[in-house]
């Protein structure tokens, strides 16, 4: 499956910029930047070739729709209605008539061209500052035609990076648990999809209960909990080859797995005799280490991005609270001191924040705090929600939400949602079935 | 040590009840719940005549109530009489907690039942423990009564 890799970036023309448009992503953006995404132009012969291969009438338009949708769901951009565009895609890509784009209030313009070259898909695109009348970026790359959706995501990542100054998160995937059936007998399968909900694929059949899948930050491995043969254990799955194996040889339930930031260890809980402790296992030499030692429930471990610390939740104080310790288990410190109980701490990829779930007075919150517990900020409140997972750039959280059933126990559903770190831009992430336990991958092309 | 822990818990509850003469009324009883522990029989099945299969817990707790201990003593007596039978203790939590913590809590509840059965002479060889966390509720309701039915440890015949 080499087609994950894209032969990337042939031309990169850095353009010096002074006072060009910038998008501030550190605050809630109430005025998304108006941007015109011109359909990528395509010559007739290329169009026919791609129509044959991909069964898409105009792949140039399709790719621009992906870019447009990505920009829209980011909440930072307002893609303008294509009906108002005056300039044809091919001409716009050569030399935009900035007055025309200015007229429809576009501040940024994306143009481009797709062609069929030696059985591959070649794309070039440009980002223009309409007000300054300047090209901000030009980029071209080649890939196999089947990767056409990823082309749209990569274009978005480049545009996002150029305009915000931070890496994007669009060429990524979400692994999650797809759910069906009555609440008392849920059927759960591992599923994977693109960040925008496309290309959904089920990875297990639903014969056994599966929970909490998490990506390895450096490879296509996934760790998760499976009730295979009614023995709840942590498994490792290679999503390219489909091979899977049990992690470690524990005489009891292992659960709550996550990878270390270098992808070389799995950290998880092992429950025995009513006590759950945190362990690590090195995937190369299989050495197992016990990290916590306390007669309380210690679980939901998550490493800091530099691998030096671990956050986890424990009920050693009587209730579930968040703790941080050194990665060898020393220096355990409680960091959550607000009202309510706290769980599922997850360290931001930027290192400065910990996202968590909080239960207070019968409501569930997703929030963030600094790694010393200060600066607690609640982003969203609901009947039930938990398990935040960070976008690779640390700007968006994905989590799941469950609905309250009615007096007859009907009306249950579980859905994936995302929200910006700013607390704005809360939206449901589309899935073909119900979903829970989402985990966000790293950028695929990096 | 386990036994002393259990006896201590039991003792504390008795003392607390003596100290609070209003014990029974201070805890709200809805007919099916005492405090927030389920006391009804809607969901209960029987391992044998007069031997209920499950015990219930308060929110976030794994302490066995007086009624739970009585149920488990009946189960222990039944297991002593039927020495070939092995069992799985399935521990569960309600939906009002995070998934991973609830897996641990279910395991802790099932082990509370296991420890008690062992103090009544049942060998640990005959008992295995399986936590379902909040994955297998019996009642799909989103209300305190439904949650109380779901906080349970169920003894299931394994052979």
Image: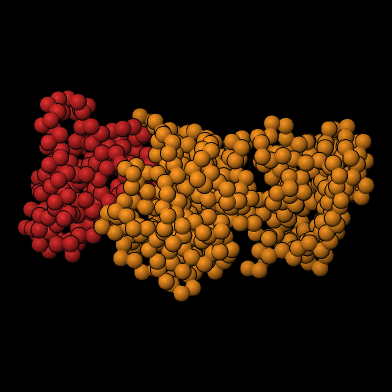
Chain colours: A orange, B red
Q: In the image, is residue A374 above or below residue A282? A: above
Q: Residue at x 78, y 36 (%)?
A: A34
Which residue is nearer to you in this view: A420 or A292?
A292
Taking the spot 65% from the left edge, 34% from the top edge, the residue there is A28
Residue farthest along the front direction in this orientation? A331
**Is B143 drawn above or below residue A279 in the view shown?**
above
Residue A264 visible in rendering: yes
How many numbered dots are placed on residues in this image?
0
Q: Please say whether residue A44 is visible from this viewpoint.
A: no
Q: Is residue A65 left or right of residue A362?
A: right
Residue A103, position in %: x, y? 88, 32
Quadrant position of the N terminus of chain A in the picture:
bottom right
Comparing A411 with A330, the one in front is A330
What residue is drawn where x is 48% and y is 70%? A283
Q: Nearest the camera: A127 or A70? A: A127
Image location of residue B60, percent across then percent down:
30, 41
Q: Would you say B8 lies left or right of A241 here?
A: left
Q: Quadrant of residue B121?
A: bottom left
Which residue appears at 31% of the width and 62% of the height?
A252
Q: Quadrant of the C terminus of chain A?
A: bottom right
Point out residue A21 in the picture as x, y percentages from the top left corner.
81, 40
Q: Quadrant of residue B115?
A: bottom left
Residue A206 drawn at (x, y percent): 43, 56
Residue A115 or residue A254, whichever sits in front:
A254
Q: Residue furthest bottom?
A: A285
């Amino acid at each position: 499956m080499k087609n994950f890799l894209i032969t990337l970036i042939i031309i990169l023309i850095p353009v010096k910029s002074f006072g060009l448009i910038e998008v501030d992503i550190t605050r809630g953006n109430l005025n998304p930047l108006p941007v015109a995404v011109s359909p990528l132009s395509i010559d007739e012969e290329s169009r026919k070739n791609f129509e044959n291969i991909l069964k898409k009438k105009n792949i140039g338009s399709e790719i621009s729709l992906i870019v447009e949708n990505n920009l829209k769901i980011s909440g930072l951009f307002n893609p303008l209605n294509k009906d108002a565009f005056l300039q044809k895609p091919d001409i716009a890509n050569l030399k935009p008539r900035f007055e025309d784009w200015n007229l429809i209030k576009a501040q940024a313009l994306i143009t481009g061209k797709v062609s069929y070259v030696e059985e591959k898909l070649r794309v070039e695109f440009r980002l223009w500052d309409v007000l300054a009348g300047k090209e901000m970026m030009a980029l071209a790359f080649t890939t196999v035609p089947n990767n056409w959706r990823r082309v749209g995501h990569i274009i978005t990542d480049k545009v996002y990076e150029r305009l915000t100054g931070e890496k994007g998160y669009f060429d990524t995937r979400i692994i999650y648990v797809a759910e069906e059936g009555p609440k008392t007998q849920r059927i759960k399968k591992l599923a994977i999809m693109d960040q925008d909900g496309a290309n959904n694929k089920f990875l297990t059949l639903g014969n056994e209960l599966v929970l909490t899948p998490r990506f390895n930050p450096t490879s296509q491995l996934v760790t998760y909990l499976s009730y295979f043969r009614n023995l709840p254990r942590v498994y490792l799955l290679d999503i390219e080859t489909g091979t899977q194996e049990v992690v470690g040889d524990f005489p009891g339930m292992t659960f709550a797995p996550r990878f270390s930031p270098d992808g070389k260890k799995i950290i998880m809980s092992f429950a025995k005799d009513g006590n759950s402790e945190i362990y690590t296992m090195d995937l190369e030499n299989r050495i197992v280490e016990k990290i916590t030692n306390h007669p309380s429930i210690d679980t939901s471990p998550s490493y800091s991005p530099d691998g030096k610390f671990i956050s986890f939740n424990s009920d050693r104080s009587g209730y579930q609270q968040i703790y941080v310790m050194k990665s060898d288990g020393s220096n355990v410190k409680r960091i959550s001191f607000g009202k309510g109980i706290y769980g599922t701490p997850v360290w931001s990829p930027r290192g400065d924040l910990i996202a968590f779930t909080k239960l207070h007075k019968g409501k569930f919150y997703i929030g963030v705090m600094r790694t010393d517990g200060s600066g607690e900020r609640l982003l969203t409140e609901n009947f039930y929600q938990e398990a935040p997972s960070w976008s690779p750039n640390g700007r968006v959280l994905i989590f799941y939400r469950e609905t309250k059933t009615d007096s007859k126990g009907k009306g249950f559903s579980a859905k994936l949602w995302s929200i910006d770190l700013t607390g704005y831009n809360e939206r449901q992430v589309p899935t073909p079935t119900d979903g829970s336990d989402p985990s966000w991958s790293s950028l695929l092309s990096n | 040590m386990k036994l002393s822990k259990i006896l201590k818990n039991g003792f504390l509850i008795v003392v607390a009840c003596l100290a609070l003469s209003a014990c029974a009324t201070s805890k709200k009883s809805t007919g099916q719940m005492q405090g927030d522990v389920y006391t009804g029989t809607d969901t209960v099945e029987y391992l044998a005549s007069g031997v209920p299969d499950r015990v219930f817990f308060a929110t976030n707790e794994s302490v066995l109530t007086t009624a739970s201990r009585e149920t488990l003593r009946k189960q222990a007596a039944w297991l002593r009489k039927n020495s070939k039978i092995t069992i799985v203790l399935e521990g569960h939590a309600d939906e009002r907690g995070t998934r991973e913590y609830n897996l641990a809590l279910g395991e802790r509840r099932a082990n509370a039942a296991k420890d008690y059965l062992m103090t009544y002479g049942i060998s640990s060889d005959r008992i295995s423990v399986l936590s379902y966390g909040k994955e297998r509720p019996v009642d799909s309701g989103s209300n305190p009564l439904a949650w109380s039915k779901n906080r349970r440890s169920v003894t299931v015949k394994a052979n």
